[in-house]
Image: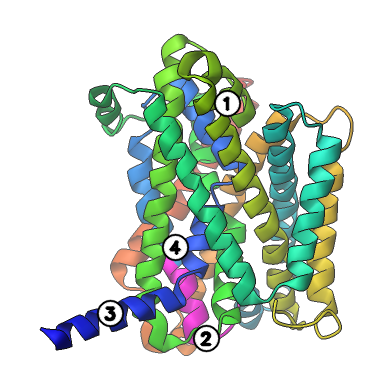
Amino acid sequence: MVLPLKRGLKRVGLFLAILGPGFITSTADNDAGGIATYAVAGAQEGYGMLWALLLITLSLGVIQEMSARMGLVTGQGLGGLIREKFGVKTTVFAMGLLLFANLFVTISNFSGVAASLEIFHIPRYVSVPLAAALILRLIMKGSYRSIEKIFLLFALFYFSYVVSGFLAKPVWGEVWKGFVPAFRFSSPGYLALFIAFVGTTITPWMQFYLQSSVVDKRLTEEDLPSSTLEVYIGAFFTDFIDFFIIVATAATLFKSGVRVESASQAALALKPLAGPYCMALFSFGLLNASILAASILPLSTAYALCDAFGWESGLDRKFREAPLFFSLAIATTLIGAAAVLVPGLDLMKVMLYSQTTNGVLLPFILVFMLLIVNDKTIMGKHTNGWVRNLVAWATAVSLIVMTILLLYFSLLGRGL
């Protein structure tokens, strides 16, 4: 009896030791734009898109596991592997796509900081500079271990959305009906929302961040079983939170016929329908998610570019040891914060369009990943099995098809 208990405790200890990269990456992907997308989905479609969470959770888990496995086996970030397999020109193309998407999403998350606190009458000209200053201090002064602990603490606050979901008092019998699959190919608006749905949960930046953070944490091939478990737990937790965001808005806004275009609008609309506590928790969740993602996006950009071009990187290094790494992180943070302070910027459109951009760009990154992870000269015995390949390729092909359909409808003049 004592021996099995010791073995069990040892396994728990090993899991807790590697906990961080997969869980944080998946959780941080529920950023400002993501919360806006799920809030809009609940308000516009009710529970009708809940079924998609099942497919997205599976795809997210499989793709994140691939990313972590590549880092554990090779000891390299994704950018470096792309350069190694496809050459400099392809790497420049991939990094260009990533830089464009990451800047867009960083702006989106500082927009989330602004929007969440403007609900409480705190102007963006106060909240955004303060958030940027806190993030820069974290990046410049923290070690990998200390920053990881802070990020895990941020992840716990996502439970505010679970409470919001229950405060909305949904009819659970109606909720479960939302898991019956239904897809409207003829509706460009539905199609755009579905692409954003996928694009907010599985993004280009997270593949680069996860793989680089696994390397930065110095995990090895021996940690593969625990890392795989952590990644799938992170994928489940992410969409568990998304479920309650949709439930909160569907049970109140959709039921009352209230249309919203952002998470902050959703929070305000919840006040008369579900009470001030629900509104406050929803707003706090948006602030928490925005700061976490706004902290990680600059690091993802810096990791990816440094890996791709062979520059020194890592949070445990000093500025003089990795000047380009820290300079890229600082520049991304400052550009993202400054853009939000531009007068007249429509924060709602920035947050929603950033997710659609991710959905359009993701297939390019997935194709690179799949070609690398199935290369035995790079991965040895740890290449993909047929099930992982099926799920990952299906995700990439589905996004390509949906993007083509979206462009087709746009050319016909059937606007979103």
Q: Residues within 10 Å of mark 1 (few under 14, many from 20)?
A: many
- State which tag comes first along the sequence, 1 or 2: 2
Q: Secondary structure at mark 3?
A: helix
- For residue 74, the mark is 2
Q: Amino acid at mark 3?
A: Leu
Give x and y (percent) for residue 309: 75, 79
Marked residue nearer the N-terminal end (3 or 4): 3
Question: Which amino acid type corresponds to the residue marked 2 in the rendered image?
Answer: Thr
The residue to which callout 1 is attached is: 267
Q: Nearer the viewer, mark 3 or mark 4?
A: 3
The residue under label 4 is: 63
Q: Give the farthest residue toward the top.
A: 256
Q: Residue 14 lies in what quarter of the image?
A: bottom left
Marks 1/4: CA distance?
Answer: 32 Å
The region drawn magenta spans 65-78
Specify which label sits upstream in the sequence, 1 or 3.
3
Magenta stretch prevailing secondary structure:
helix
Q: Position of residue 102 (x, y in %)?
A: 70, 54
Q: Secondary structure at mark 4?
A: helix
Separation (CA) of disc 3 from disc 4:
29 Å
The residue indicated by pointer 3 is 9
Are dots 1 and 2 in contact, CB under 8 Å?
no
Instruction: Tell me the crowding category of disc 4: few under 14, some 14 to 19, or many 20 or more residues within 10 angstroms, Cα based.
Output: many
Residues at discs 1 and 4 in contact (Cβ within 8 Å): no
Of circles 1 and 4, the one toward us is 1
Q: Are marks 3 and 4 in contact (CB under 8 Å)?
A: no
